[in-house]
Amino acid sequence: MQAYHVQTTVANDGSLKLHNLPFPAGESVEVIILTRSAISSRQNSYPLRGTPVTYINPTEPVAQTDWEAAQ
């Protein structure tokens, strides 16, 4: 399956016009229309990336009861 991506704007009458498509005449194609906001919302897949991490007492020993519960 060959994919082709193009950005365009919907006309006042609600139509879209695509020109110079890289497919031969008569070929069957599937058209999927996504709004631009839907595409941009997918770009932030990792919202916590880059946020600082704080460790509270990272060198404090683990209590014996906590250690056994983890096993």
Image: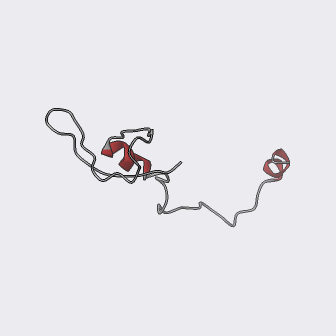
How is this picture coloured?
secondary structure
Q: Position of residue 27 (x, y in %)?
A: 44, 42
**Residue drawn 37% across the image and 42% down it:** 38
Q: Nearer the viewer, residue 54 or 62?
A: 54
Q: Residue furthest top?
A: 13
Q: Residue furthest left?
A: 12
Number of marks: 0
Q: Position of residue 66 (x, y in %)?
A: 78, 49
Q: Position of residue 59 (x, y in %)?
A: 69, 67
Q: Nearer the viewer, residue 38 or 21?
A: 21
**Residue drawn 21% across the image and 40% down it:** 10
Q: Is residue 9 above or below residue 50?
A: above
Q: Nearer the viewer, residue 61 or 32?
A: 32
**Residue drawn 47% across the image and 60% down it:** 51
Left or right, 59 with reference to 9? right
**Residue drawn 28% across the image and 46% down it:** 18
Q: Nearer the viewer, residue 65 or 50?
A: 50
Q: Residue furthest front?
A: 25
